[in-house]
Image: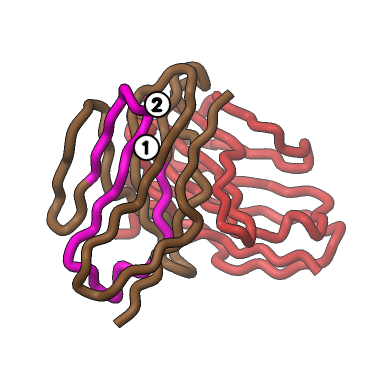
Chain colours: A red, B brown
Amino acid sequence: DTAVSQTPKYLVTQMGNDKSIKCEQNLGHDTMYWYKQDSKKFLKIMFSYNNKELIINETVPNRFSPKSPDKAHLNLHINSLELGDSAVYFCASSQEWQNQETQYFGPGTRLLVL
Amino acid sequence: GQSLEQPSEVTAVEGAIVQINCTYQTSGFYGLSWYQQHDGGAPTFLSYNALDGLEETGRFSSFLSRSDSYGYLLLQELQMKDSASYFCAVRDAYSNYQLIWGAGTKLIIKP
């Protein structure tokens, strides 16, 4: 019954490694997002996808690459992890691009880079 | 540019009423959302105001004044479980309608 799910919930890894986070929503929504939340709790939008197409790509290092195989899935791959990548990454979805005011968030993936 | 301001922290007493303010500056304001996030949890949607006035949902109400570029979230009959961070977020037409988020207000409730 989970609306937006993410895996893994926790990720501890060494600097320089490559890792992926997966996100799935079963709400039938068209639009999905990736957010990064740092230790000060600031929520920063990273990517926005609408109907599998990348719409917004904020100022994010190109080590971060999103992939949307279908409307229900939006994965995030991170290459050459750095200490500063340590944060909580949230996936979210909204019914349509025009309904961004109401977003449903996944539980988050807590990434710690050592 | 766009900016949102909300207090970083607010303290209130259980059973009381608290108001969390949000002022914004955007080029193409579309609406104001409020989200709640408990420690260790994910943000959850609380309310959305596109028009001026007060919207009530149980103990929570949200207000918007477009002419003042200002809104607030009002929490009544505070309960300990209301201790959380509260984010305001603005839809901005000039940013392709995406949400612009405030830095969040940590609400501390004392017994």
| Residue A47, picture quadrant | top right
Considering the numbered disc 1 on the image, is that residue within a helix, a strand or a loop? strand
Residue at the image position 65 percent from the left and 32 percent from the top: A58
- Residue that sits furthest to the bottom in the current view: B111
Quarter of the image with the N terminus of chain A in it = bottom left
The total of numbered circles placed on residues is 2
Residue B73 is a magenta residue? yes
Q: From this viewpoint, is residue A91 visible?
A: yes
Instruction: In this rendered view, identify the residue nearer to me: B7 or A83.
Output: B7
In the rendered view, tell whether residue A62 sits above or below residue B52: below
Q: Which residue is mark 2?
A: A97
Q: Position of residue A96 (x, y in %)?
A: 35, 29
Q: Position of residue A41 (x, y in %)?
A: 56, 57
Quarter of the image with the C terminus of chain A in it = bottom right
Q: Position of residue A27 (x, y in %)?
A: 31, 44
Q: Chain of mark 2?
A: A
- Residue that sits furthest to the right in the current view: A16
Q: Which residue is mark 1?
A: A94
Q: Are marks 2 and 1 in contact (CB under 8 Å)?
A: yes
Instruction: In this rendered view, identify the residue nearer to me: B34 or A17.
Output: B34
For the residue marked with disc 2, what is the amino acid? Trp
In the rendered view, tell whether residue B91 sits above or below residue B55: above
| Residue A29, picture quadrant | top left
**What is the span of residues highlighted in magenta in the rendered image?**
B62-88
State the separation of the CA atoms marked 2 and 1: 7 Å
Q: From this viewpoint, is residue A28 visible?
A: no
Instruction: In this rendered view, identify the residue nearer to me: B56 or A52.
Output: B56
Q: In the image, B53: left or right of A46? A: left
In the rendered view, tell whether residue B17 sits above or below residue B57: below
User: Which numbered tag is attached to residue B16?
Assistant: none
Instruction: In this rendered view, identify the residue nearer to me: B80 or A100.
Output: B80
